[in-house]
Image (cartoon, helix red, strand yellow):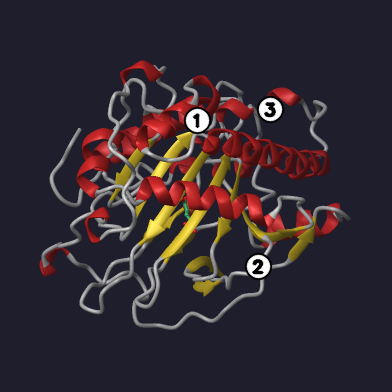
């Protein structure tokens, strides 16, 4: 799908599992150095603009609990997931240099001219390991609203399967970016599993924490870029939403703008160097039978500086059946189908609600 201008690329996420082949990549145009034409033409009509909820208020900052992965305190981890559904993770062993280099690599792809990204990278295509989107990273969000961002959606499975390094070279990005991403993915996998297993052990499920709960190949890396928001525009960087993941890990720059919903108000979560922001997603809430809270969050785009974030979404194996007392049995594939249904009808979806048993 190649739409003109600022658009909604609803396929970006839904078809991320489709098998794709590297052989179709033929383009040899070098990657652009940063240039003005890299951005989507962000020219929405004023009438399209609705004030974001709570616009004009200045949310107070909330210092999130910092959980040290090196000296993991299961009680603190559990409390953070119960009360806020969010925390900062330190002591994670992910070298800052590695995450900076991964962000730089993503950035180089993002710096390609917009037309090229739209025509060659938007929508799932054979041979293309990632999907470029702009306007909103649907389907998690309300499609009727424009979001002030563009992004790259990369299923982890595609890094190896599609020889990401070779593909990068065809874009003019160093082929070593593939190896770098693999290394990043391995670190993230280690981090995810440690946090996940600790949370699951604390739930004392009937079954032992099992490898089959999580599947590395089902994880997704997403790079989001929120261009500077002109004063005349009134859009959110990303609309309020809950993640569908089990756990989401946000590796952000120092611009800030991510807010979480806490006690019926939006609160800022100021960036803190060398920590990852961890968010509990819908699947984890259901798996915990509502012990842990899938946290609503949004991103406010800055008028002063553009924000970039690198997110790692960890999923249960897609066919893993969640069986809990408050929910009827479902797996991620059921969740995704429900999400798609909601998007087609109302454009908005509280997916978990549709699996909750009536009291
Ligand atoms: O970009 C961010 O900081 C958060 C992004 C996010 O919430 C998402 O991609 O689901
Ligand atoms: Fe999110």
Count residues near mark 3 (Cα–Cα under 10 Å), then give few for <14, some for 14-19, many for 20+: some
Q: Earlier in the sequence, mark 3 or mark 1?
A: 1
The image shows residue 203 at horizontal and vertical percentages of 79, 41
* Mark nearer the viewer, 1 or 2: 1
Residue annotated with mark 2: 273
Count residues near mark 1 (Cα–Cα under 10 Å), then give few for <14, some for 14-19, many for 20+: many
Height in image: 259 above or below 315? Answer: below
Question: Of helix, strand and loop, which one carries label 2?
Answer: loop
**Does any atom of ligand 1 lie closer than 8 Å to the CB of label 2?**
no
Q: Earlier in the sequence, mark 1 or mark 2?
A: 1
The answer, for residue 81, to whether it is visible in the render is yes
Horizontal side of 76 relative to 113 (left or right) equals: right
The image shows residue 311 at horizontal and vertical percentages of 53, 49
Q: Are marks 3 and 2 in contact (CB under 8 Å)?
A: no
Residue annotated with mark 1: 165
Height in image: 34 above or below 125? Answer: below
Q: Residue at x 63, y 27 (%)?
A: 215
Height in image: 69 above or below 158? Answer: below
């Amino acid at each position: 799908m190649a739409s003109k201008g600022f658009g909604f690329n609803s396929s970006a996420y839904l078809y991320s599992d489709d098998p794709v082949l590297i052989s179709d990549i033929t383009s040899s145009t070098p990657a652009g150095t940063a240039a003005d034409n890299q951005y989507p033409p962000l020219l929405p009509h004023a009438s399209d603009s609705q004030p974001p909820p709570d616009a004009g208020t200045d949310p107070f900052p909330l210092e999130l609990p910092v959980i040290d992965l090196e000296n993991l305190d299961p009680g603190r981890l559990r409390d953070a997931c119960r009360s806020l559904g969010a925390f900062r993770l330190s002591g994670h062993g992910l070298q800052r240099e590695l995450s900076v280099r991964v962000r730089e690599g993503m950035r180089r792809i993002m710096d390609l001219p917009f037309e090229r990204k739209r025509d060659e990278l938007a929508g799932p295509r054979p041979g293309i390991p990632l999907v470029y989107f702009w306007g909103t990273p649907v389907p998690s969000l309300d499609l009727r609203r424009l979001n002030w961002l563009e992004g790259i959606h990369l299923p982890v499975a595609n890094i190896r399967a599609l020889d990401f390094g070779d593909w990068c070279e065809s874009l003019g990005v160093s082929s070593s970016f593939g190896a770098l991403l693999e290394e990043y993915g391995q670190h993230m996998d280690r981090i995810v599993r440690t946090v996940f297993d600790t949370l699951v052990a604390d739930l004392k499920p009937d079954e032992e924490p099992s490898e089959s709960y999580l599947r590395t190949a089902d994880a997704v890396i997403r790079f989001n870029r929120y261009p500077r928001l002109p004063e005349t525009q009134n859009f959110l960087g990303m609309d309020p939403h809950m993640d569908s993941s089990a756990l989401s890990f946000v590796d952000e720059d120092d611009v800030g703008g991510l807010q979480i919903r806490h006690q019926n108000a939006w609160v800022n979560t100021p960036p803190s160097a060398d920590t990852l922001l961890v968010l509990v997603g819908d699947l984890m809430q259901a798996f915990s039978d509502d012990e842990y809270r899938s946290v609503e969050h949004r991103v406010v785009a800055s008028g002063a500086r553009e924000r970039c974030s690198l997110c790692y979404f960890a999923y249960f194996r897609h066919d893993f059946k969640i069986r809990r007392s408050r929910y009827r049995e479902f797996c991620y594939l059921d969740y995704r189908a429900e999400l798609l249904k909601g998007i087609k009808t109302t454009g908005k979806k509280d997916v978990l609600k549709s699996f909750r048993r009536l009291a």
